Amino acid sequence: MSEADNNPATEAETEAVETEATDTAPEGKTVEQLEAELDDLRDRLLRAVAEEQNTRRRAEKEKADTRAYAVTGFARDMLDVADNLSRAVAAVDEASLAEASQPLKNLVEGVAMTERALLSKMENHGIKQVAPEPGSAFDPNLHQAVAQIPSDQPAGTIAAVMQTGFVISSRTLRAAMVAVSAGSPAGGETPSGDTGGNVDLKA
C-alpha cells in the first residue's frame, strides 16, 4: 500500500491548497499589467496627498487674511477721526500757539496727544499711516496724484501732500492724495502745456 493510500487526507489537502492558490492569484493579468495598476494607484495617492496639502495651505492663507483684514471696515470709519484730529492740530500755527493762553496750549497738546495715541493703536492692529515727504518717489500703489504743479522737487516726484494715506497689512486702505512735481519752471523742464508726461494722474 502506498503512502498516499495510508494518508487519504493528504491528497485532498494538496488539492485544496492548489485551488486556494489559483483563486487568490490574479487571472489573466501579466506582471506588466499589475505594475501599471500599481503605478496608477501610486499616482492617485500622490495626487490626493498634493491636493490635501494645497487645500490646507489655502485654508491657512484664508485664515491669516481674515485675521489681518478683519478690522478693515472699522479702520475706514476711523480714518475720518484721524483726519479731523490732524486738521485740528494743523489749524493752529506755531506763532499763534506761542502767544496763546496756557489753557489753549493744553487743549492743542491734548488733541495732538490724542492723534498720536490713535495712530499708535491703529498701527498695533496693522494699520499704518502713509505720509510721504516732498521729493519722495511717486508710487501709484500708495499715492493718488490729484495735480501736477511746478516745484523745486525733481519732475515726477511728490511736490506736496494734500491728505495722508493708510495701509492695512499689505493692502492700501486709502491712497495718499498728492501733487506731483512738474519740475522747476525756471529750469525750463516743463514747457507750456506739458504736464510732465511721466506720471499718470488717474492712477
Image (cartoon, rainbow, N blue to C red):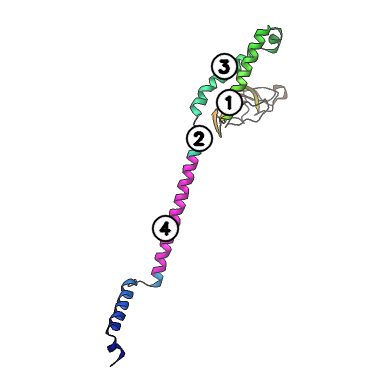
Side of 96 relative to 84 (left or right): right
Between disc 4 and disc 2, the foreground one is 2
Residue ID at (71%, 10%): 98
Q: Residue 50 at what x, y percent from top left? A: 46, 52
Residue 108 drawn in magenta: no
Q: CA distance from mark 1 to mark 4?
A: 50 Å
Q: Main secondary structure of the magenta part?
A: helix
Disc 1 marks which residue?
121
Q: Residue 180 at what x, y percent from top left? A: 63, 25
Between disc 3 and disc 2, the foreground one is 2
Q: CA distance from mark 3 to mark 2?
A: 28 Å
Q: CA distance from mark 2 to mark 1?
A: 17 Å
The type of residue carrying mark 4 is Arg
Camera-nearest residue between 38 and 21: 21
Disc 3 marks which residue?
84
Secondary structure category for the residue under label 2: helix
Circle 1 residues within 10 Å: few <14, some 14–19, many ≥20: few
